[in-house]
Image: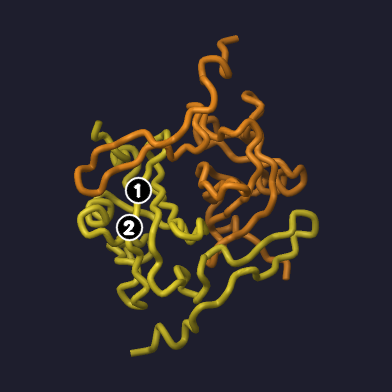
Chain colours: A yellow, B orange
Amino acid sequence: MTAGPNFDKHELIPVIAQDEASGDVLMLAYMNRDAYAETLRTGRVCYYSRSRQKLWRKGEESGNVQELKSLYFDCDADTLLVKVNQIGGAACHEGYRSCFFREVDPQSEEVRVVGERVFDPAEVYKKK
Amino acid sequence: MTAGPNFDKHELIPVIAQDEASGDVLMLAYMNRDAYAETLRTGRVCYYSRSRQKLWRKGEESGNVQELKSLYFDCDADTLLVKVNQIGGAACHEGYRSCFFREVDPQSEEVRVVGERVFDPAEVYKKK
């Protein structure tokens, strides 16, 4: 069986990145067919940036690349799950391990920061 | 701080559901503002079905509801992560614990089923 995710229905497919070691959900991004092929070929996760409209080799600027450990697709073949080794320990451009560093209290709707900041974005993304 | 996910930019926001106990990523679905409000109010996860174009109270047919344990949103405020207690043990309508029950081998692109089937869909979704 070789049928995989279906890029015919949607050109862009959402991709959930999960830290293989901790199980933490790190981020959600998108892949097109090219990003998917490059990810499989190189073993490094490559997304498609919707804002920049081009391939986004995660970590190309910060060095915080994601090594692909395993890859899954869902029952509708329109969502991917990648388990990764997150180099540098932080997936979020704001310096947190996970992009999901803010929790909402269901009763009060109060928001609190629950994530741990691993790096200072101002240091990593220096103005050229 | 009470600012939460931003439904102004996108009417529908992707939602990652993760099993709180096992850490398994169960599924990806969508919420609109109403689904989000109902989820917070009831403590049961309510999505918005894109195909049926209406609120989708997860488990309303199968009984496999998702009890909300905690809720997070990402750095761009346009993706949610819900940690849940998955009643019945299976999130997928095909009877698997997780919708991500198929793994792709990066080298060969061979697909294999890795998930465990918890229920028989033919039994659960009986024709009326």
Q: Is residue B111 above or below residue A109?
A: above
**In what element is the residue under mark 2?**
strand
Q: Is residue B104 above or below residue B53?
A: below
User: Image quadrant for the N terminus of chain B?
Assistant: bottom right
The residue under the point 63% across, 38% down is B86
Q: Position of residue B108 (x, y in %)?
A: 20, 43
Q: Farthest residue toward the right?
A: A108
The residue under the point 56% across, 35% down is B91
Q: Farthest residue toward the top?
A: B128
The residue under the point 73% across, 49% down is B40
Dot 2: within a 10 Å radius of its alpha carbon, few (fewer than 14), some, or many (20 or more) residues? many
Type of residue at label 1?
Leu
Name the chain letter of the residue that bears numbered label 1. A
Q: Is residue B108 visible?
A: yes
Circles 2 and 1 in contact, beta carbons < 8 Å: yes
Count of picture labels: 2
Type of residue at label 2?
Leu
- Which of the 4 image quarters holds residue B55? top right
Q: Position of residue B83 (x, y in %)?
A: 62, 50
Q: Of A38 and A82, which appears nearest the observer?
A: A82
Q: Position of residue A48 (x, y in %)?
A: 32, 59
User: Image quadrant for the C terminus of chain B?
Assistant: top right
Q: Which residue is mark 2?
A: A68
Q: Position of residue A118 (x, y in %)?
A: 51, 78
Q: Which residue is mark 1?
A: A71
Dot 1: within a 10 Å radius of its alpha carbon, few (fewer than 14), some, or many (20 or more) residues? many
Q: Is residue B12 visible?
A: no
User: Is B14 on the left-hand or right-hand side of B109?
Assistant: right
The residue under the point 57% across, 13% down is B126
Q: Of A50 and A93, which appears nearest the observer?
A: A93
